[in-house]
Image (tube, grey):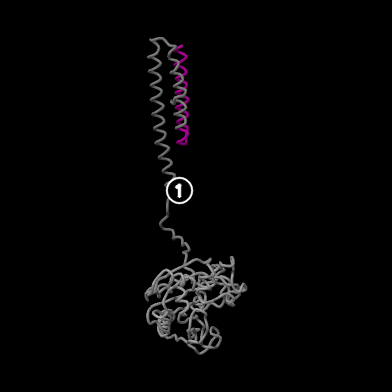
C-alpha cells in the first residue's frame, strides 16, 4: 500500500512540475496549482487515504507529500515570476514610443459661427449691465400675444404664421414672452436680454426658416426715453461692427411698442456706397425697436405713469450672416464641415 502511494505521489510530482514548466500563461499556472494542491486537488486526495495506512507508514507518506507540495509551490512561484517578467518585456516592446517620429495632428472642435456671435452679444450686453434670461419655447398664448397687446383676431396670431399646440399654447413666435415673464416676476429697474429659439410658419429658403434664433432686450426704469434706446443701439452696434457704422431709424408699427421703429445699419462692407450685400442701397435692415407700450407695462403690474422702457429684438442668424458675409441662411444649419471649418 505504501509503495503504491509513494509511486502515485511521485507521478503527480513529475507530471505537475513538467506542466508548470511548459505553461506560458499565468492563469494556466494558477489552475495547475489549484488542481494539485487545492481542497479537491490530486495531492490532497492522496493524503485523505492516509487513514488506511499504519502508524509507521503515515510519517513516510506525509514527508513525501510535503516535499512534493513545497516543490510544486516553488515551481509555481518561479514560473509566475518568469511569466510576469516576460509579459512586462513584451508590453514594453509593444507600447514603446519612438520619440523621433512626428506627432499626429488631431482635429480640434470649434465654436459654430452663431455661437461665436451669440457669446459676443452676451458679453457686450453684460458689460452694459444687462442680465441674460431665458424662458420656455412652448408657451401660453397670453404671454406670447395677449399681454403684448396682440389680441385675438390679430394677423400675427393666424394659424398660417404660428405653430399652435392647442388653442392656448403655441411654439413661441418671439422671445418677448420672456420679457413679460421677467416683468411679472421682477420690479423695475429691469435690464435684460433674452436670446433663444423661436418658431414661425415660414418656408425654408436662403433668408427664411421655420426655426430661428432671436435676441431681444428690455429696459424698464424711471424716465426711460427713445433717446436711451437710440444711444444703447449705437453703443452696441459700434462694439459689434466698429466705430464707423451708422444707424438709421425708420417709423414702423409693433403692437407692443409706441413709438416703434425699424433700424437699419450702414453697410460695413461698402461703407454705404452700395454693394451686393446691401443690394445697392447702402443700408442693411438689422432689427425692430421701440418704447414699451404703456398697456404692456400695465398688463405686467408696472405703473406706466411712473415707469417707462424700451425694447428691441434682432435675428441672430441675420447678425451672423452680416458678420461673416454669408448669403444663405441654410448654410448655418446644414452642418457641412467644409463650411464650418472656415470659422
Span of residues in magenta: 1-29
Report x, y in % for residue 62: 39, 17
Q: Is residue 261 magenta?
A: no
Determine the main secondary structure of the stretch shown in magenta. Answer: helix
In the foreground, 284 or 51: 284
Q: Quadrant of residue 150?
A: bottom right
In the foreground, 276 or 301: 301
Report x, y in % for residue 32: 46, 29
Report x, y in % for residue 252: 52, 85
In the foreground, 310 or 215: 310
Q: Is residue 25 magenta?
A: yes
Q: Is residue 312 above or below residue 6?
A: below
Q: Quadrant of residue 298?
A: bottom left
- Identified at 47% across, 82% down, the residue is 290
Q: In the orientation shown, which residue stands out farthest toward the bottom?
A: 273
Label 1's element? helix
What residue did someone put label 1 on?
94
Number of other residues with Cα within 10 Å of mark 1, as a class: few under 14, some 14 to 19, many 20 or more:
few
Amino acid at each position: 500500500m505504501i509503495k503504491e502511494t509513494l509511486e502515485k505521489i511521485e507521478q503527480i510530482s513529475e507530471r505537475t512540475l513538467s506542466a508548470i514548466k511548459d505553461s506560458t500563461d499565468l492563469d494556466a499556472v494558477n489552475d495547475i496549482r489549484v488542481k494539485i494542491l487545492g481542497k479537491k486537488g490530486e495531492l490532497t486526495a492522496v493524503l485523505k487515504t492516509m487513514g488506511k495506512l499504519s502508524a509507521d507508514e503515515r510519517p513516510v507518506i506525509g514527508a513525501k507529500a510535503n516535499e512534493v507540495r513545497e516543490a510544486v509551490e516553488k515551481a509555481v512561484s518561479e514560473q509566475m515570476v518568469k511569466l510576469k517578467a516576460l509579459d512586462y518585456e513584451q508590453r514594453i516592446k509593444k507600447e514603446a514610443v519612438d520619440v523621433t517620429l512626428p506627432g499626429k495632428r488631431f482635429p480640434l472642435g470649434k465654436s459654430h459661427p452663431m455661437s461665436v456671435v451669440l457669446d459676443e452679444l452676451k458679453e457686450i450686453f453684460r458689460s452694459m449691465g444687462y442680465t441674460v434670461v431665458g424662458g420656455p419655447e412652448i408657451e401660453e398664448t397670453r404671454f406670447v400675444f395677449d399681454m403684448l397687446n396682440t389680441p385675438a383676431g390679430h394677423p400675427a396670431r393666424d394659424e398660417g404664421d404660428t405653430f399652435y399646440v392647442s388653442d392656448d399654447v403655441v411654439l413661441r413666435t418671439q422671445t418677448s414672452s420672456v420679457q413679460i415673464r421677467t416683468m411679472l416676476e421682477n420690479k423695475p429697474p429691469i435690464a435684460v436680454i433674452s436670446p433663444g429659439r423661436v418658431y414661425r410658419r415660414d418656408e425654408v429658403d436662403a433668408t427664411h426658416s421655420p426655426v430661428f434664433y432671436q435676441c431681444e432686450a428690455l429696459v424698464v426704469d424711471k424716465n426711460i426715453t427713445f433717446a436711451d434706446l437710440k444711444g444703447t443701439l449705437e453703443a452696441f452696434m459700434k462694439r459689434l461692427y466698429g466705430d464707423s457704422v451708422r444707424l438709421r431709424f425708420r417709423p414702423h408699427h409693433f403692437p407692443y411698442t409706441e413709438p416703434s421703429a425699424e433700424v437699419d445699419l450702414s453697410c460695413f462692407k461698402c461703407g454705404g456706397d452700395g454693394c451686393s450685400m446691401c443690394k445697392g442701397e447702402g443700408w442693411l435692415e438689422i432689427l425692430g425697436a421701440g418704447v414699451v407700450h404703456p398697456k404692456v407695462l400695465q398688463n405686467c403690474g408696472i405703473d406706466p405713469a411712473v415707469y417707462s422702457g424700451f425694447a428691441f429684438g434682432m435675428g441672430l442668424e441675420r447678425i451672423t450672416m452680416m458678420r461673416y458675409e454669408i448669403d444663405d441662411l441654410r448654410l448655418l444649419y446644414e452642418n457641412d464641415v467644409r463650411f464650418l471649418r472656415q470659422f
